[in-house]
Amino acid sequence: MKHILIVDDSKTVRNLVAFIMKREGFRVTMAEDGLDGLEKLYSAGELDLIISDINMPRMDGFTFIKNIREQDNFRDIPIIVLSTEGQEEDIQQGLGLGANLYMVKPAQPEKLVRNAKMLLG
């Protein structure tokens, strides 16, 4: 069973994405910001995919992605950004820091699942 980390400061979004992914058979861990996300990443053992927001307190998604990509053992985990920030500069920054995909909220559940499965092979 593939394990996904969902990082978003909105409890509603976290729960919605978790519900969608669990329904597809994924195991889910949730974090409320980048700092919490890093803690969960270190303690989760095996993680197959990360879905992260950008605008969050304590540590934003860009800093979170940068931190992950700087560490050898997490460098290859696929990352999907799921954010309300849809400006071209935000998208380019997210992808430039190492996100594999950038999706703008509200994302269609089928598209999110399809993209997750595509990144997981």
Image: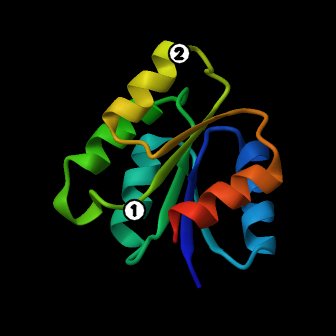
Answer with the quarter of the image where residue 39 lies. bottom left
Near-viewer residue (20 or 9): 20
Answer with the quarter of the image where residue 47 lies. bottom left
Q: Amino acid at mark 2?
A: Glu
Residue neighbourhood size for the residue with mark 1, other residues' Cα within 10 Å, grouped as few (<14), some (14–19), many (≥20)? some
Q: Is residue 62 above or below residue 49?
A: above
Q: Is residue 49 left or right of residue 97?
A: right
Residue 44 at x, y = what percent?
Answer: 42, 72
Residue visible at 54% across and 30% down? 56
Answer with the quarter of the image where residue 8 lies. top right
- Measured in 3D between alpha carbons, the distance from the residue under mark 1 to the one under mark 2, in whole angstroms, is 28 Å
Residue 29 at x, y = what percent?
Answer: 58, 66
Read off the residue under disc 1: 41
Q: Is residue 10 above or below residue 28?
A: above
Under circle 1, the secondary element is helix
Q: Is residue 11 above or below residue 94?
A: below
Task: Give the number of marks.
Answer: 2
N-terminal label among 1 and 2 = 1
Residue visible at 20% across and 47% down? 70
Q: Amino acid at mark 1?
A: Leu
Which numbered tag is attached to residue 88? 2
Residue neighbourhood size for the residue with mark 2, other residues' Cα within 10 Å, grouped as few (<14), some (14–19), many (≥20)? few
Residue visible at 67% across and 25% down? 84
